[in-house]
Amino acid sequence: MSVFRYPRPPSSDITPHAAWLSRRDILATGLAGAAGAILPPRIAQADTLAARPGPLSDGGLTPTPLQDVTHYNNFYEFGLEKTDPAERSGDFHPRPWTLRVEGMVAKPRTYDIDTLLARPLEERIYRMRCVEAWSMVIPWIGFSLGDLLREVEPLGSARYVAFESVLRPSEMPGQSGLLPVLDWPYVEALRLDEALHPLTILAVGLYGQTLPNQNGAPVRLVVPWKYGFKGIKSVVRIRLTDSRPRTAWNVRAPDEYGFYANVNPAVDHPRWSQATERPIGVRGGFFGAARQPTLPFNGYGAQVAGLYAGMDLRRDF
Ligand SMILES: Nc1nc2c(c(=O)[nH]1)N[C@H]1C(S)=C(S)[C@@H](COP(=O)(O)O)O[C@H]1N2
Ligand SMILES: [Mo]
């Protein structure tokens, strides 16, 4: 074994979300890729993006190194291992792209990605806490989802916002795997008041550049007080509705992944504790030496706890 700088995570780190698939089954589908292969990073067409520092950025946080943000990913459309999205998304085309916003709105509209990139963009440095109990700090570039939704004029009857990822099996090997890990396309949803909250953004970049494919190019949702799986990648459709939409992980394993998925150290996942987390990219983080406490609402409680007044967050996890 040679010396390596970015160790592959131990196999126990592989996809706890999908632990019902045995490692042998995963390998049989070919989804796991060439285990151990060292491939050059392929970050497609990163263009520089201008953004002003957002008033809601947490300037006190130290961002996770770019190498980790772009090489330790969950994006099952490209495979189940953390390194698959970086290694297997090189043929994905994030342009041309349109984002359709429709449903219970007065002015449904189709946005071209170029018009979204031309909006005033902000940097938002947010904590990201995966339900698998690891975390990062990511300097996103994006814009308020609420601002976009107000442009299409939600009807008074709208109560939820549904999101849909792209369905493109020819470019996303995980979507044509033999084992259907999730029902494709990946879908997610928020309550309308959560979607309108000023912390909720659509991100079009990170670290000053357009989004790498593996992070959800060209546009993805970021909801920093919720577990990472709510942050749906490569979004093509947003639909306002009056009934609670299906969400991918909740459909797959409702006892493990709730609709709300607010980060909550007091409510454990059935198979592991949520009290602490491993910060990725911090010395000792990969192997557990540098665990840190998980914060209620991922540290954003002062801003968002009021959204859940009167709710039992143990039941509505
Ligand atoms: N379409 C899609 N979106 C997705 C996922 C996915 O598999 N497919 N994984 C989710 C999970 S579990 C997490 S933790 C975050 C990871 O985002 P990152 O790789 O940019 O850190 O993306 C979320 N969005
Ligand atoms: Mo996650």
Image (tube, grey):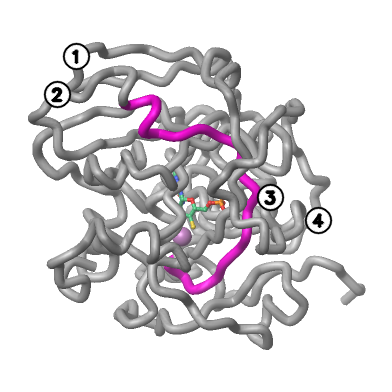
Q: Position of residue 163 (x, y in %)?
A: 32, 35
Task: Report if the beta carbon of the residue with label 3 is closer than 8 angstroms to ligand 1.
Answer: no
Does the numbered disc 4 mark a residue whose Cβ is under 8 Å from ligand 1? no
| Residue 70: mark in rendering | 3
Q: Counting other residues with Cα less than 10 Å from the Cα at mark 4, is it few (<14), some (14-19), or many (20 or more)? A: few
Q: Name the mark on residue 155.
A: 2
Number of residues whose C-alpha sits closer than 10 Å to that of mark 1, classed few (under 14), some (14–19) or many (20 or more): few
In space, the residues marked 4 and 2 are separated at their CA atoms by: 51 Å
In primary-sequence order, the first of circles 2 and 3 is: 3
**Which quadrant: the C terminus?**
bottom left
Residue at mark 4 = 38
Look at the image and give the residue range highlighted in magenta: 131-149
Kind of residue sitting beneath label 4:
Ile
Please tell me which of labels 3 and 4 falls first in the chain: 4
- Tell me the element at label 4: loop
From the viewer's perspective, is residue 75 above or below residue 227? above
**In the image, is 37 to the left or to the right of 201?**
right
